[in-house]
Image (cartoon, rainbow, N blue to C red):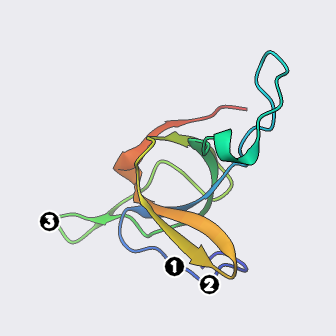
Amino acid sequence: MAKGIGLKPLDDRVVVRSAEAEDTTAGGIVLPDNAKEKQQRGEIVAVGPGKLLDSGERAALSVTVGDEVLFGKYAGNEVKINGEELKIMRESDLLAKVEK
């Protein structure tokens, strides 16, 4: 279970903390709160044990806690835990892992 969030995702699901919305555009224009778009980027804060295969074994996930990932605009389900907005999604909803 991830520290502080109190969630343990099942199977091949992950919990993602979305990055904060940008305050300014690339050109330096300051955006008002109602014009900010939610980021499609976030940090993995919890991972499940992996998908259960027909053989009874678990398939390992390709992401770990702390990885920065990209996901689709409508991917996952938003939940609010301890006042923090998080997304729970399947690993297959992730588009890429950001290399540092």
| Left-right relation of 50 to 80 | left
In this rendering, is residue 24 above or below 64?
Answer: above
**Where the N terminus falls, by quadrant?**
bottom right
Residue type pointed to by label 2: Gly
- Frontmost of labels 2 and 3 is 2
Secondary structure at numbered mark 3 = loop
Three-letter code, disc 3 = Asp
Tell me the CA gap for discs 3 and 1. 23 Å
Helix or strand or loop: what does disc 1 sit on? loop
Q: Earlier in the sequence, mark 3 or mark 1?
A: 1
In 3D space, how far apart are the residues under numbered discs 2 and 3 (Cα atoms)?
Answer: 29 Å
The residue that mark 3 highlights is 54
Residue 21 quadrant: top right
Q: CA distance from mark 2 to mark 1?
A: 7 Å
Neighbor class of circle 1 (other Cα within 10 Å; few <14, some 14-19, many 20+) is some
Disc sitting over residue 66 in the figure: none
Residue identified by numbered label 1: 8
Q: Is residue 81 left or right of residue 88?
A: right
Q: Residue at x 66, y 78 (%)?
A: 5
Q: Is residue 84 visible?
A: yes
Lower position in the chain sequence, tag 2 or tag 3:
2
- State yes or no: discs 2 and 1 in contact (Cβ < 8 Å): no
Front-lying residue, 4 or 86: 86
Label 2 residue SS? loop
The vertical placement of 19 against 87, above or below, is: above
Query: How far across and how far down the image is residue 37, in percent?
Result: 61, 41
Depicted 44 relative to depicted 40: above or below: below
Residue under label 2? 6
